Amino acid sequence: MRISPFERFANYAILIIVALVVLTPVATILVTAFGPASASDARVSMWHPENFQAAWVEGRFGQYMATSVLVAVIVVTLTVVLSSLSGYAFGTMRFPGSTPLFYLFLLGIMVPAEVIVVPLFYDLRDIGLVDTIWAVALPQVAQSVAFGTYWMRTYFRGVNRSMIEAAKLDGASSRRILWSVLLPMGRPALTTMTVLVFMWTWNEFLIPLIMSPSGQFRTAPLGLAFFQGQYTQGTALLAAGAILVALPVVLLYIFLQRHFIKGMLEGAVKE
Amino acid sequence: MQTSSPRTDRTGRGANAASRPARRYQYSAYLYILPALLIYGAFMLFPLGRAVHLSFFEWDGLTLGTFIGFENYLDIVADEQLRAAFVHALVLMFFFAILPVCIGLVLAALLTRAKVRGLPLFRTVVFLPQVIAMVVVAVTWRQIYAPDGLLNSALRAVGLDAVTRSWLGDYDIALPAVGLIGTWVCTGLVTVLLMAGMAKIPVEQYESARLDGAGPIREFFSITVPSVRAETTVALTLTLIASLKTFDLIYMTTRGGPGYSTTVPSYEVYRRAFELGQVGSAAAVGVTITVIIFIISLIVNRLGERSSA
C-alpha cells in the first residue's frame, strides 16, 4: 500500500512521542539513582554509581534478593513440574470427570490474591505456618499451577497424536512418553511458562506482605516498600533500590522479549 | 484460539479408533493431576471457600466470631468508605482499561498500516512497563509527582507555575494521578495485542475501501475497529481485571489518601483485615472483587464467542 510522505512523517512522530512518554519515567529513575544522594555529594560530582552499593547494604537488598531468588526457585520449579504432569493428563488422556476438574483449575486463573490471602493468613497462623518460606511460596504455586495446567494442556493437545501412538507401539509407558518425547519437544512452551511464572513471582507484592509479617522472608519488592517508608529523604538510594528490584526481570525481558510478548498475548487470548 | 473444544476433539479422535480402543479410560490420569490438585486445593480452593464462610461473620481475627448473615455485603452499599472504594475502582477502570484501549486502537492502527522502521524496537519499548514490578513503577511515579519532582519542574519551566501542586496529596487530583500511572502501564499491552489482531486484516479490504472513496478515518471506524473486536474484548478484560487488583500501586503511592480519596476495594481488604481487625468485612470485599472478576470474564467470553461465530 502507498503511504504519503506526510503520513509517514506523522507515523514516525507518533512513534517517537509515545516512546518518549514510556521512557521518560524510566530515564528519571535512572538519572536519580546515579545522582547525588545528598547536598554534600552534589558538590563532589553528579555521577554516583556507589549509590547502588549503599542501597544494597543500607536497604538490605542482598538479603531480600536472596529471599526472592529462593521463593522464585520454589515457585517456578514446583509450577513447571506439577503443571507438566497435570497438563499431560488433561491434554492427552480420557478419564471420568476430566471436564469439571479442568474447569476447577481454570477457576484459579481468575481468583485474585486479595480474596485468598485473608483466610490463608488466619488459618496458617493457627497451624504455625505463617512466617515460613512455605507460606510465601505455596499460595503462589497454587495460583501459577492453575495457569500452568491450562498452558501445558494447550501444548499437549496441540501435539500430533501420531507421535504418541508411535511411542506407544514401541512399548513406551505413559511416563516415558511424557519424559522422553513430549517434554523435550515442548521446550518453547516450557520456556515461555517459566519466564511468565518467574516474572509474576518476582513482582508479587500482596502475598509476601501478608504471609511474612515479621519480615523474616521479605522479598525484594517488599524490601523496597520498607526502604521507601524509612528513607523519605534519600531519593537517590531509593531509586537505586528500585532499579535493583526491577533489574532481573527487565534483563530477562530484554533477552527473551519475544517469549515475553508471545507468552503474554497467547496467555491473554486463551484465557 | 488454537485449542479445539472437547466436542470436536471427541469426534476428531474417531480417526484413531482403529489403533486404540475408543472408550477405555486412563485412570492413571488422576495420579498425574493429584500433586497439582493437592497444592491448588489447599492454597486456593480451600481459602476461597473459607473467604466465603468468613464473609458471613463479624470477626476481629482473635476472639470468637459472630454470624451476621449478609450484613458485611450490605455494608458495601451502606458504608460510605466501602462505597467510595468501589466508585474509585470504576474511575480507575476508565484509566486502566478504557483510555488504554482508545489510545491503543489509534496507535495500533497507525503502526500496522505504516511501513516504518524500528517497529520491533518500538514494540519492545511500549511493552516494557508491563514487566516492571508495580512497586518500582510506584516509586518512580512518586518521584515524578513529588512537589519538587519532574512534572512540577516541567510545568514551572514553561511558566505554568499556577498548575503545580502535590499531585498525590490533592484530594481531587490524587485519584486521576494514580489512574494515569495505570494508563502508562496498560497501554503497551493493549497496543501490542491490537497490533497482532490488525496484522491479520487482509490488505484487500483497505484497497477496496480506498476505491470506494473512504478516507483514513472512515477506514478506521468501518474496517479496523470492527475487525479486532475479539482482541479488543480480551484487552478490556485483562485491563479491567488489572484495575481491580491495584493493591501494590495504592499501597506504595497514597495508602488510600489523602483522606479516603484514593482507597480501592483491594486496599480495603488489606486495611480491614490487617489494620482495623474487621476480618469478616475484608472477606466480603474480597469475595465481591472475585465475583466482579468472574462477571467481567463471563461477559467478555460471551462477546468473544458471538464475534467468532
Image (cartoon, grey):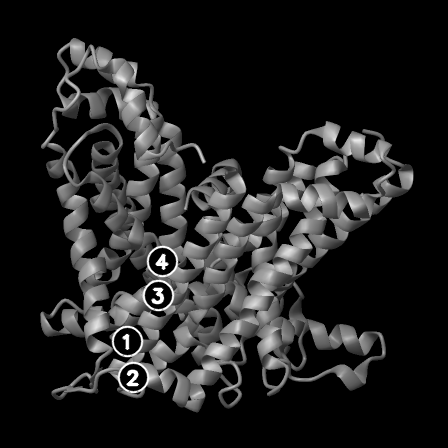
Name the residue beneath numbered marker 1.
B283
Q: Report how far apart the C-alphas of labels 2 and 4 lie in the structure.
A: 39 Å
- Which amino acid type is marked by label 4? Met
Q: Nearer the viewer, mark 4 or mark 1?
A: 1
Dot 1 alpha-carbon crowd within 10 angstroms: few under 14, some 14 to 19, many 20 or more: many
Q: Is residue B53 visible?
A: yes
Q: Which mark is residue A65?
A: 4
Q: Report how far apart the C-alphas of labels 4 and 1 lie in the structure.
A: 31 Å
Chain ID, mark 4 = A
Q: Earlier in the sequence, mark 3 or mark 2?
A: 2
B142 left or right, relative to B160: left
Chain ID, mark 2 = B
Q: Nearer the viewer, mark 2 or mark 4?
A: 2
- Which amino acid type is marked by label 2? Asn
Tell me if label 2 and label 1 are in contact, CB under 8 Å: yes
Q: Report how far apart the C-alphas of labels 1 and 3 lie in the structure.
A: 10 Å
Kind of element beneath mark 1 = helix
- Which amino acid type is marked by label 1? Ala
Q: Earlier in the sequence, mark 2 or mark 1?
A: 2
Q: Nearer the viewer, mark 2 or mark 1?
A: 2
Taking depth in this image into account, of A189 and B104 the one nearest to the observer is: B104
Name the residue beneath numbered marker 3.
B290
Q: Which mark is residue B72?
A: 2
Q: Report how far apart the C-alphas of labels 4 and 3 lie in the structure.
A: 31 Å
